[in-house]
């Protein structure tokens, strides 16, 4: 089809910099195909994470022409033809090598969130009853493929570097899926306020804009969680109840 | 010892559904557990499973039960299945699925609030619990999120190069971390291999990067027997266009929801060839087929939902006869249901969201308006490491295998949905029995000379550097060769050529080179994995040559019929001395009398 130029971030003992490559692009190729072609033919040691190449595993997150995206779901057809395609690792995470970043922080954060705790089963055979309309919202959150693009783009991490203070959009979605699960009886509101730092989010919706699964992260997960936290800790009537509750 | 060493009672290699389920179970038995995975946690190929998990819950049709599921599985597998595994699987799958709900999984619901089940090829009743068309994601995330609170140590992005033995027993594994490339030793009293399949040895495959057959290869090299390696499943509906997505899976759920297959003349060619074994269960016309997909309990299955091996061959036949689609497939049409349903477009998007998304984004096709172009894609291996049905222990003491890399449950052809239930049922069993084994056996000692030998072998590609061959080039050629010569239709002379070529590849793999350093170096990773891919490819080609009949996923144009003699044996491979592979035809054990009766009753 055409020769396209790429600028790909390489880490190197002698300093990190962009390296230029030319790739012969054929119909329907995605950015990850081009990266694989470079790896196979020009730079065997070009480091990149990938698993499914179908937008289902969330491994190949990177910044393509400055936009956080999955490389496997970004078609070459949609790239401007008049300038090189730049590919960089996600900015909010430390680089391990080339396009591979250290995302282990996300796994540590998740482990701290209180796990699913179901109410006792509804039926004698140990099963539960839930209606589809009651789980639609939770199923939206559970579409998350953990690509961490939302974490990458969140300015609380990206600009303000408050990685330790704010759990990030992914973990808001994860917590929302637990909190809104019809069977769950755990309470994570205090943790949301005190540990996950939900107050740091000022709903700029950057996360929602980059989500490859089109989860309405801000509107459907973060804002309702903020409301639950606010109702619990700041509602005067609720505070009164909780004071009396304590005296008991 | 020179290398960092980790000690655990049970080592699980692989973090897909089977590995995680095994780890959770072993850990709950009170032993220490390590999970080693090549990718990040939660990214394994299980994530790509779409249609659902098969379990005879009977939520949608209460005529279902374990006996029906057992019979369907045996029929689908052309009776090559390990009948004891098929029995355990059918009996235990419902409990394993319900257990996921207790761990937070959110399956789609029936009207009365129970887990919804859908139709799938070869299953008599609606049996697949599902979440739209992303069931695998739901399963792996549920297991992952439950597992991280069970005290399991997870080693992410570690590659196991080989298993370590002491005498007959397995005592651990030799590995390296991908980030730094440092060698690591895992000492364990029991090891569970749960590394999944091998689709990546073919050019056209639905499989994730991870599916290189590594676990089958390391188990083989440690002395474990392999069986049924000739039975490879080519899923009938992979994407065929554009080239970069060729092979990507289109769930059978599309056909379960009413999608039909047509050739370029618009003909529903699946009605042309219905195998005798399935005649009584297949609809007589298009109208009855439609009613079946819409839940009419008196209607029979449309022929599009015949078993995968058969549908794949019918598609190939149409393409060969010049009746295919522009890019060498056939048409799969779900858009036509707008003739039957109001709001069909919305219905399709709700039932098949990933499929809609996948075609829209990657092929520029709106499946609510136009048909998809589809063709067969390498999807699954029914064969693998031979295991004991109850315990999942291999022929090597202390070594267990479970999930796709283990063999037996599916026989000659796997039914859709039976792999996810396989992972749960036998993942749990492997975890339980490995934990018990670990409790009863101790005294693990690592053979340091073997470790040094493996370390030197692993680093050899760096010594060759630029003077060695490019590992990616050999890998590409291997994939092309397997696709051409050991694919969906096979014959003796092609298989002979393939075995010769594999021996050449083996030699060339010993001469690959890599540049750069050991930190996250894909050239080096491929140089090592290539050896495993070739081992598995060779096992498939040799077994395919040995089985001189056609059955399930294995089709020989020079022996197009089933053979009575071959129905009684498993082609069994074992590592001999040096590079020699011992090939035997091992007689199958007769089906237990009560199970035989069940099969006969349901014929």
Image: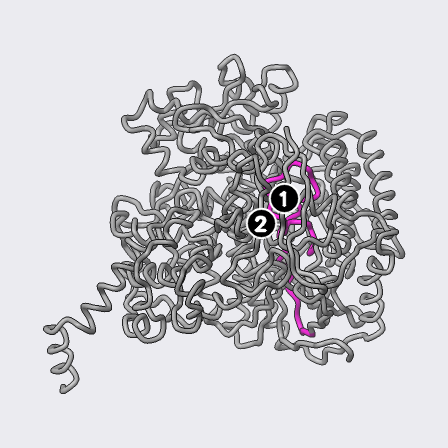
Spot occupied by residue B556 in the image (x, y as percentages of width and height): 73, 29
Spot occupied by residue B322 in the image (x, y as percentages of width and height): 63, 15
Q: Which residues are magenta?
A: B187-215
Looking at the rendering, which quadrant does residue B342 occupy?
top left
Residue to which mark 2 is pinned: A87
Q: Earlier in the sequence, mark 2 or mark 1?
A: 1
Q: Nearer the viewer, residue B141 or B273?
A: B141
- Look at the image and say whether residue B206 sits in the magenta stretch: yes
- Decide if residue A63 is on the left or right side of residue B336: right
Q: Nearer the viewer, residue B97 or A191?
A: A191
- Look at the image and say whether residue B318 sits in the magenta stretch: no
Spot occupied by residue B395 in the image (x, y as percentages of width and height): 72, 60
Residue to which mark 1 is pinned: A6
- Decide if residue B91 is on the left or right side of residue B501: left
**From the viewer's perspective, is residue A145 above or below residue B27?**
above
- Decide if residue B539 is on the left or right side of residue B336: right
Residue at figure coordinates x 82%, y 59% from the top left: B462
Few, some or many residues within 10 Å of mark 1 (<14, 14–19, 20+): many
**From the viewer's perspective, is residue B392 above or below residue B343?**
below
Looking at the rendering, which quadrant does residue A176 occupy?
bottom left
Marks 2 and 1 close (CB-CB < 8 Å): yes
**From the viewer's perspective, is residue B50 above or below residue A58?**
above
In three-dimensional space, the C-alpha distance between marks 2 and 1, rounded to whole angstroms, equals 8 Å
Q: Nearer the viewer, residue B171 or A212?
A: A212
Dot 2 lies on which element?
A: strand
Q: Chain of mark 2?
A: A
Dot 1 lies on which element?
A: strand
Residue at figure coordinates x 30%, y 45% from the top left: B110
Q: Chain of mark 1?
A: A
């Amino acid at each position: 089809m055409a020769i396209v130029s790429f600028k790909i971030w390489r880490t190197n003992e002698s300093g990190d910099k962009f390296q230029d490559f030319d790739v012969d692009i054929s119909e329907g190729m995605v950015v990850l195909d081009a990266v694989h072609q470079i790896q196979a033919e020009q730079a065997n040691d070009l480091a990149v994470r990938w698993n499914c190449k179908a937008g289902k595993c969330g491994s190949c997150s990177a910044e393509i022409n400055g936009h956080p995206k999955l490389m496997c779901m970004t078609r070459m057809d949609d790239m401007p033809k008049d300038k090189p395609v730049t590919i960089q690792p996600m900015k909010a995470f430390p680089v391990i090598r080339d396009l591979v970043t250290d995302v282990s922080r996300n796994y540590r954060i998740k482990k701290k969130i209180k796990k699913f705790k179901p109410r006792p089963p509804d039926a004698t055979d140990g099963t539960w009853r839930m209606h589809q309309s009651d789980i639609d919202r939770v199923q939206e959150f559970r579409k998350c493929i953990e690509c961490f693009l939302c974490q990458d783009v969140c300015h609380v991490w990206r600009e303000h570097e408050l990685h330790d203070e704010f759990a990030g959009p992914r973990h808001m979605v994860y917590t929302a899926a637990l909190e809104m699960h019809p069977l769950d009886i755990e309470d994570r509101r205090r943790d949301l306020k005190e540990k996950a730092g939900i107050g740091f989010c000022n709903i700029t919706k950057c996360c929602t804009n980059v989500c490859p699964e089109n989860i309405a992260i801000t509107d459907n997960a973060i804002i309702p969680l903020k409301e639950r936290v606010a109702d619990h800790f700041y509602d005067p009537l609720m505070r009164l109840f909780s004071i009396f509750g304590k005296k008991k | 010892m020179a290398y960092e060493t980790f000690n655990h009672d049970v080592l699980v290699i692989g973090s897909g559904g089977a590995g995680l389920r095994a780890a959770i179970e072993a850990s709950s038995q009170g032993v220490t557990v390590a999970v080693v995975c090549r990718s990040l946690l939660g990214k394994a190929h299980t994530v790509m499973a779409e249609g659902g998990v098969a379990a005879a819950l009977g939520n949608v049709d209460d005529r279902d039960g374990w006996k029906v599921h057992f019979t369907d599985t045996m029929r689908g597998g052309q009776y090559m299945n390990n009948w004891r595994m098929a029995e355990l699987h059918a009996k235990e799958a419902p409990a394993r699925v319900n257990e996921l709900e207790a761990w937070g999984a959110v399956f789609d619901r029936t009207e009365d609030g129970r887990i919804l089940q859908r139709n799938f090829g070869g299953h008599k009743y609606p049996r697949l619990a599902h979440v739209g068309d992303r069931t695998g994601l739901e399963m792996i995330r549920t297991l992952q999120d439950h597992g991280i609170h069970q005290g399991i140590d997870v080693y992410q992005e570690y590659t196991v190069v080989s298993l370590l033995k002491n005498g007959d027993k397995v005592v651990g594994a030799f590995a390296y971390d991908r980030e730094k490339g440092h060698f690591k030793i895992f000492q364990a009293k029991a090891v569970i291999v749960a590394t999944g399949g091998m689709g990546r040895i073919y050019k056209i495959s639905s499989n994730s990067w991870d599916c290189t057959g590594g676990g089958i290869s390391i188990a083989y090299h440690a002395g474990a027997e392999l069986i049924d390696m000739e039975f490879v499943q080519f899923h009938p509906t992979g994407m065929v266009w554009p080239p970069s997505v060729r092979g990507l899976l289109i769930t059978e759920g599309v056909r379960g929801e009413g999608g039909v297959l047509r050739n370029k003349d618009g003909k529903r060619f699946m009605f042309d060839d219905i195998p005798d074994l399935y005649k009584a269960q297949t609809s007589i016309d298009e109208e009855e087929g439609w009613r079946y997909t819409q839940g009419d309990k008196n209607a029979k299955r449309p022929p599009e939902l015949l078993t995968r091996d058969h549908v794949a061959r019918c598609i190939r036949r149409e393409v060969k006869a010049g009746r295919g689609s522009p890019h060498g497939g056939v048409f799969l049409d779900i858009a036509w249901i707008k003739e039957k349903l109001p709001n069909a477009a919305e219905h399709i998007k709700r039932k098949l969201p990933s499929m809609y998304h996948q075609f829209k984004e990657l092929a520029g096709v709106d499946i609510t308006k136009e048909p998809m172009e589809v063709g067969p894609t390498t999807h699954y291996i029914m064969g693998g490491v031979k295991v004991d049905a109850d315990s999942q222990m291999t022929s090597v003491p202390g070594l267990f295998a479970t999930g796709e890399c283990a063999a037996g449950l599916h026989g000659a052809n796997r039914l859709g949905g039976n792999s996810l239930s396989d992972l749960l049922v036998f993942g749990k069993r492997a975890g339980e029995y490995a934990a018990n084994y670990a409790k009863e056996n101790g005294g693990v000692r690592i053979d340091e000379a073997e470790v040094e030998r493996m370390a030197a072998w692993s680093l050899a590609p760096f010594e060759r550097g630029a003077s060695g061959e490019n590992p990616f080039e050999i890998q590409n050629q291997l994939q092309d060769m397997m696709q051409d010569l050991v694919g969906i239709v096979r014959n003796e002379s092609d298989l002979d050529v393939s075995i010769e070529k594999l021996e050449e590849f083996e030699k060339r793999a010993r001469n690959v080179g890599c540049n750069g350093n050991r930190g996250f170096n894909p050239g080096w990773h491929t140089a090592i994995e290539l050896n495993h891919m070739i081992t598995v490819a060779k096992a498939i080609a040799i077994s395919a040559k040995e089985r001189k009949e056609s059955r399930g996923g294995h089709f020989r144009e020079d022996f197009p019929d089933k053979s009575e003699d071959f129905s009684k044996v498993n082609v069994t491979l074992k590592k001999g001395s040096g590079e020699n592979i011992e090939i035997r035809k091992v007689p199958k054990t007769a089906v237990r009398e009560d199970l035989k009766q069940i099969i006969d009753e349901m014929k």
